[in-house]
Each structure stands twice: as structure tokens, then as C-alpha cells.
């Protein structure tokens, strides 16, 4: 695929901005502020714009909200329970407490982290009210959870209770791990 020179430059700039590291980075702007900017109901102030570009984590959140907003505008039949993936972000949390759960932005998936044998057990749970729950439980496709860096956190099939679990595969605790990799995660079907 050949991209026009301008498109390639834009993609490279975007990747550079989103992948850089900033010590002590955290979300600098609330979702409501970012969504208002995306909707055009409120422009970012110069200080907010500066905070956005100074924080790779906030930029990634802004991009995620933008992509989510774009996906929501795609036409889909009301009776079509198609699911192509869900994503979420680690919210600002106290570092004194161990991470217990993470939920996707659509509230359809929850990751639970349980201490076990000096390590952790991670459990992926599907919400019973998810519009595609019945289909996923019936068809049992392979699913995976990936962190913000693309590493697989968990992979498998849902059991009859809508859960999949395994031992935490990393040396760092879940909260620290997600912070190291952009604080994002995604639940997605595994391509056959």
C-alpha cells in the first residue's frame, strides 16, 4: 500500500507523539473536556492544549475517545449484536492500593486481579447484559486481552459463566504493568 507523502508524515508524527514517554505522566484533562473539544461545543484553552500535547497518556486517551466517537456514528442495525472489540484505560488510582479491577469503556468486560501464590490471577468477565453475550457464550470464540504495548495478558475461551482466567504473565504487579504500557488495554476476538 502506497501512502501519499503527506499521509505518511501525518502518521509518523502521530506515532511519535503517542509513543513518547514522559516521566510521571498522568491524565491531565477530564474526559468531559476532551469530549467537548471533539464535539466542538467547547474549544480547548491554550493551557489545556499545552497540557494535552505535554502528556502522551492524555493524547492517547483523546485519540481513543475520538476513535470511539467515530465508531459510534457508524450505522449498525439495532438487532445486530456484532462485537469487534472493547477497550479501556487504567484510571488515575492510588499507588498505595493494589489494582483489583479494570473495566472497558463500554462496561461489557471486567478484568479482576486476585493475589495468588505470591503472584496474581487475572479473570476476564463478560457482563450478562452485553448485547452480544448470548452469541459469545454459544459460539465460544477465542478471545484475548492485550495491554497498551500489544502484549497478551490473557487468551482463551469463555466458560459457561462468561469468564476466562489464567495466571498473571508478567513480573510486575497489574497496576504497575498497565502504567508502564500506556495505561490502556483491549479485549478482542482472536482471528481464526
Image (cartoon, rainbow, N blue to C red):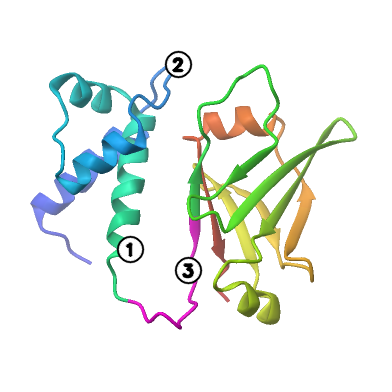
- Part of the protein shown in magenta: 76-86
The number of discs equals 3
Q: Position of residue 119 (x, y in %)?
A: 82, 34
Residue under label 2, please give it.
24
Instruction: Using the image, determine if residue 136 lies above or below residue 164.
Output: below
Dot placed on the residue nearer the N-terminal end, 2 or 3? 2
Residue found at the far right of this picture:
117
Can residue 16 be seen? no
Dot 3, crowdedness within 10 Å: few (<14), some or many (≥20)? few
What's the CA distance linking mark 1 and mark 2? 32 Å
Sequence-wise, the earlier of marks 1 and 2 is: 2
Q: Secondary structure at mark 2?
A: loop
Residue 154, compared with residue 170, is above or below; it is below
Image x and y of residue 106, in percent: 49, 55
**Can you tell which quarter of the image residue 23 is in?**
top left
Quadrant where the N terminus is found in the figure? bottom left
Q: Which residue is mark 1?
A: 72
How far across and how far down the image is residue 19, in percent?
36, 35
Q: Is residue 102 magenta?
A: no
Nearer-the-camera pick, 59 or 170: 59
- Residue at 50% of width from left, 77% of height from top? 81
Q: Nearer the viewer, mark 3 or mark 1?
A: 1
Name the residue nearer the viewer: 142 or 161. 161
Q: Is residue 78 magenta?
A: yes
Residue at 57% in and 59% down:
108
Mark 3 to mark 1: distance in Å? 13 Å
> Could you classify mark 2 by the number of other residues whose Cα lies within 10 Å: few (under 14), some (14-19), or many (20 or more)?
few
Which residue occupies 53% across, 36% down? 90
Question: What x and y, as percent, mark residue 100?
Answer: 70, 36
Determine which residue is flagged by label 3: 84
Q: Secondary structure at mark 1?
A: helix
Question: Quick one: label 3 or label 1, which is nearer the N terminus?
Answer: 1
Amino acid at each position: 500500500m502506497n501512502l501519499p507523502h503527506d499521509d505518511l508524515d501525518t502518521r509518523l508524527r502521530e506515532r511519535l507523539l503517542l509513543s513518547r514517554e514522559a516521566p510521571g505522566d498522568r491524565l491531565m484533562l477530564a474526559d468531559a473536556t476532551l469530549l467537548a473539544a471533539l464535539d466542538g461545543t467547547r474549544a480547548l484553552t491554550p493551557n489545556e492544549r499545552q497540557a494535552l500535547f505535554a502528556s502522551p497518556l492524555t493524547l492517547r486517551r483523546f485519540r481513543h475517545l475520538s476513535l470511539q466517537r467515530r465508531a459510534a456514528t457508524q450505522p449498525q442495525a439495532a438487532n445486530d449484536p456484532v462485537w469487534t472489540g472493547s477497550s479501556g484505560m487504567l484510571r488515575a488510582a492510588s499507588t498505595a492500593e493494589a489494582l483489583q479491577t479494570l473495566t472497558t469503556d463500554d462496561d461489557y468486560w471486567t478484568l479482576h486481579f486476585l493475589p495468588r501464590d505470591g503472584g496474581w490471577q487475572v479473570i476476564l468477565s463478560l457482563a450478562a447484559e452485553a448485547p452480544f453475550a448470548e452469541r459469545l457464550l454459544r459460539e465460544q470464540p477465542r478471545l484475548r486481552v492485550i495491554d497498551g504495548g500489544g502484549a497478551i495478558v490473557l487468551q482463551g475461551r469463555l466458560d459457561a459463566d462468561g469468564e476466562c482466567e489464567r495466571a498473571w504473565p508478567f513480573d510486575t504487579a497489574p497496576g504497575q504493568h498497565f502504567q508502564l504500557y500506556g495505561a490502556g488495554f483491549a479485549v478482542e476476538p482472536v482471528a481464526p
